[in-house]
Image (tube, rainbow, N blue to C red):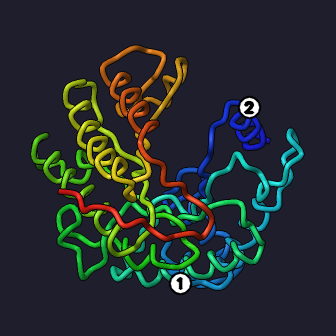
Amino acid sequence: MGLDFVISEGGKFGVKLILSLVNNFNDYGGKSEYVQWAKERGEQMQNEDNFFTNPMVKRFYKNHIKTVLTRRNTITGVVYKDDPTIMAWELMNEPRCPSDVSGAMIQVTNILSSVLFCCYKDENHLLEVGLEGFYGASSSQKNPNNSPHGTDFIANNQIPSVDFATVHSYPDQWLSGRNHFGQLDFLQQWIYDHIEDAQEVLQKPVIFAEFGKSGYNASQKNQLYSVVYSLIYRSARIVGVAAGGLFWQQLVQGMDSYKDGYEVILTEPSSTVRLIAQQSKRLSVTPRRFLSKRKHEAPKAKRLT
């Protein structure tokens, strides 16, 4: 019922939603809960990464996807797979598989889930994996601290039924040993690399689906937002693949228990809110490159310089 209400309200105000089908981490159950369900039914499970390989867990996940896609909203009467308020489905929030640094285990799950997605004939919505953007072992030098995380930004997004790529950016967490300016240097290269790879290799749009800076130093937060926004805009203005950026996290007044130092409250005027508004306005007048279901052709755009 809660999600029915969210989708209904989104439709009233013209908000488009990206809905995640499961979480990598334990919040809201996560992949560990699927593994636990299988273990309770006698399956031999070594660790949470069995989510990606165990046949029973895969069946649980497929049944979940079917249940969500075929649910009829009790408020609007619209089946989820037909609802225009939903822009895209995310297979998993921030998937990681540490036991296989190549990203191959996640690749198997992506293929099966993508095929399943198509089988339910949801031709109205886009599909994305939910990746943070970590590269596979062969390109791990691009990752924070040069470490693989069991995903592969290139291979995992090259599956044909995956419509666009996602990237997350938390240099303050990933590179806590560097100072603020060292983190910004990494962030700039991180974003540049992913835009280039999405344009030249994947030939799919890319959304910077999470980014932020913890703490309440407005100057440092604004510097980080400016780096992200400027590179997205440079791509967007030449009809490139960068399709937008979603900061973590937007709250409203009264949600104090959800505050984590990253939050932005748009009704509380600040320099950060002004930056967000400025980015929204300038993106609104750039040439549009629309995302459409299974149309991955990237326009020939100038390389970022």
Residue at screen point 41% across, 71% down: 203
Q: Which quadrant holds residue 145?
A: bottom left
Along the line of sight, which residue is nearer the eye, 237 or 253?
237
Q: Which quadrant holds residue 161?
A: bottom right
Q: Which label sits on residue 12?
A: 2
Along the line of sight, which residue is nearer the eye, 30 or 4?
4
Residue at screen point 34% across, 75% down: 201
Residue 79's spot in the image, x, y percent? 84, 54
Q: Is 253 on the left-hand or right-hand side of 134?
A: right
Along the line of sight, which residue is nearer the eye, 248 or 122?
122
Q: First in sequence, mark 1 or 2: give its number.
A: 2
Residue at screen point 35% across, 31% down: 261
Q: Helix, strand, or loop for circle 2?
A: helix
Along the line of sight, which residue is nearer the eye, 295 or 21?
295
Viewport quadrant of the N terminus: top right
Query: Distance of mark 1 from mark 2, alpha carbons?
Result: 38 Å
Label 2 crowd bin: few (<14), some (14–19), many (20+), radius 10 Å = few
In the image, residue 183 above or below residue 47: above
Residue beneath disc 1: 108
Mark 1 or 2, closer to the camera: 2
Residue 108's spot in the image, x, y percent? 53, 84
Q: Label 2 is placed on what type of residue?
A: Lys
Residue at screen point 79% across, 56% down: 82
